[in-house]
Image: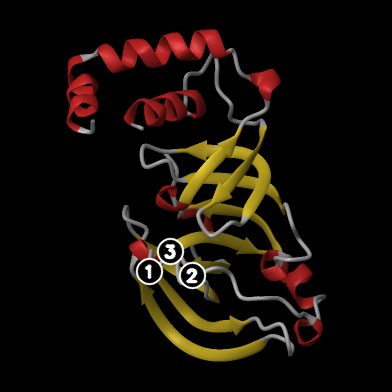
Amino acid sequence: MVCFYYFLVSTLRIESRNTLIGHQVTVELKNDLAITGILSSVDQFLNIKLDDIRVVDDTKYPHMMAVKNCFIRGSVVRYVQLPASAVDTALLQDAARREAQTPTTAAAHTMNR
Amino acid sequence: MTDLQKYVDLTVEIITSDGRVIVGTLKGFDQTTNVILAGCHERIFSENEGVERVALGLYIIRGDNICLIGELDQERDASIDLSEIRAAPITDISRR
């Protein structure tokens, strides 16, 4: 889980050369709401800002019809669906492995097992 | 860094972890997503009748209870007839 978290944060976050900011992603929340939008920013809590949003099942969830951009609290995110074309999985897996090997994150990884 | 500075003094819609929808003016926030909402009201969605509006006034909402904060497009909001909308409330995730 911890590994996955670093995997995700490092994918989504800054990394100027290889960022997903500006791409369309779908964020599924723990309350089953799924929102598609342009990724605008992500922080260390996995709080996510999306622009130009659309609720995936908008007939079931008309609650956000007048919302055009939003801030999603990281603690309620279940999945982030990334565009396959924008992700180099081999590179990412390697980055996540290296991140898990650094002393601080490796310790956190052991603690969470 | 993702923060809410851009939403200050705008009308926002907040979805809480117990599935409520609260609309008001964002007056302040902090790093744990605690927020201050002025002049807010709750929109109660139901499958059998239109959306009910309940005035709430000034609220401080603790960050733990917040799922999502959306900027409300007031033009688009004004064009929606809430009394015509039928929808089940959003799932409560606060007791899991």
Residue located beneath label 3 in the image: B66
The amino acid beneath tag 1 is: Arg
Residue located beneath label 2 in the image: B92
Residue B63 shown left or right of residue B56 in the figure:
left
Q: Is the C-beta separation of discs 2 and 1 under 8 Å?
A: yes
Which numbered disc, 3 or 1, marks the residue that appears first in the sequence? 3
Q: Does residue B70 lie above or below B1 as drawn?
A: below
All told, the count of numbered labels is: 3
Q: Residue at x 23, y 33 (%)?
A: A112
Q: Residue at x 36, y 32 (%)?
A: A1
Q: Residue at x 42, y 41 (%)?
A: A46
In the rendered image, residue B41, in percent from the top left (x then y), is placed at 54, 84
Q: How far apart are the two marked residues, 3 and 1, measured between alpha carbons? A: 14 Å
The amino acid beneath tag 2 is: Asp
Residue A14 in sight from this viewpoint? yes
Please, which chain is the residue tagged with disc 3 on? B
Helix, strand, or loop for circle 3? strand
Q: Are marks 3 and 2 on the same chain?
A: yes
Residue A46 shown left or right of residue B19 in the figure:
left
Residue located beneath label 1 in the image: B95
